Image: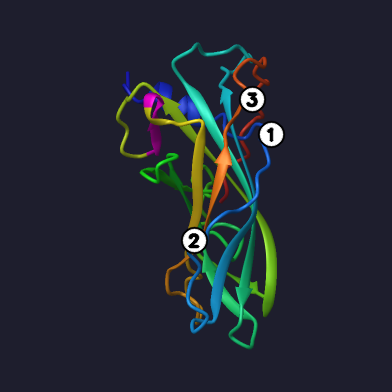
Amino acid sequence: MDANAPIRLLFALYLATLMGCQVWPTGSQTASDAYPASIEIVKAEAALHRVADANGEALGDDFFMLRTRCVVQVENRSGKTQSVLSHFGSAFDDLRVRVRDESGRRLVATTHTLWADPLLSGQWFPLAEGTTEVELSSATLVGPGLVDDEYPLIIDRELTQTIQLEYFGGFPGSDLSRAIQSNRVVVKVADRTMAVPRKPVPSPQDRV
């Protein structure tokens, strides 16, 4: 049996509804105004949840899921609508979230497309001129240190009650493909681990 199979099962449960504790952005690490694109987090939430098996039963005290949800404003100052190449479903699929502990030490980086099935061929998606607001979510396993290079994981003893979030990335295939970074926000992690886990939502059908 694949030793990493339990981890993959846990990650398949990420589709549950995201919940969290709202905070406001603090600090700034925005890209220079000389570059015609920027990313800004204007609202953020984070919560730690129990995870459940296929029957909706809690999997124990060893594994949890850190879920984040951010409202992000993307500014396209290039003077035109840009066409962005993606193998998923939007112009924002290259944007990744970096999670840090309360001291600023990096814990993990992931993306909202991590659990999605990629399209067999890339498609072009528009990024309108001006400001576009989008909600991006992520789910990261928090556990006792099992190593699986395929998936991001936070060691449970490293997760602090307050974390820092920032987005980075670009818009492949467009004039705005250079990697840029957002402001950094401080978020209090809401503890949802006492709640009964929801029965997992069935995974979507594979794309063809």
Would you call the spot at circle 1 few (<14 residues within 10 Å), some (14-19), or many (20 or more)?
Answer: few
Q: Is residue 185 above or below residue 195?
A: below
Query: Which kind of residue does numbered mark 3 sit on?
Result: Pro
- Determine which of the numbered discs, if any, sits on residue 199 in the image: none
Residue 7, by quadrant, is top left
Q: CA distance from mark 1 to mark 2?
A: 23 Å
In depth, the one of 136 and 1 nearer the eye is: 136
Question: Where does the image place residue 40, in percent across and percent down from the top left?
Answer: 59, 63
Q: Secondary structure at mark 3?
A: loop
Highlighted range, magenta? 151-157
Q: Using the image, determine if residue 63 lies above or below residue 141.
A: above
Instruction: Report the residue marked by disc 3.
Output: 200
Please give the name of the residue rendered at 69% of the width and 68% of the height, measured from the top-left corner.
132
Question: Residue 21: image x %, image y %?
Answer: 67, 36
Q: Are marks 1 and 2 in contact (CB under 8 Å)?
A: no
Tell which circle, 2 or 3, labels the residue nearer the N-terminal end.
Answer: 2
The x, y position of residue 187, in whole percent, is 57, 42
Say which residue appears at 61% left-offset and 53% top-offset. 25
Mark sitting earlier along the chain (3/1): 1
Amino acid type of the residue that numbered disc 2 sits on in the rendered structure: Asp
Graded by Cα atoms within 10 Å as few (under 14), some (14 to 19) or many (20 or more), the crowding at tag 2 reads: many
131 lies left or right of 37: right
The residue labelled by disc 2 is 94
Q: Quote the CA–CA distance across marks 2 and 3.
A: 27 Å
Identify the residue under disc 1: 17
User: Which residue, as the protein is rendered here, is positioned at the far bottom?
Assistant: 79
Viewer-nearest residue: 21 or 132: 21
Residue found at x 67% / y 20%: 199
Q: Reply above or below: 114 against 19.
A: below
Q: For residue 128, which quarter of the picture?
A: bottom right
Considering the image in quadrants, where does the N terminus appear? top left
Which of marks 2 and 1 precedes in the sequence?
A: 1
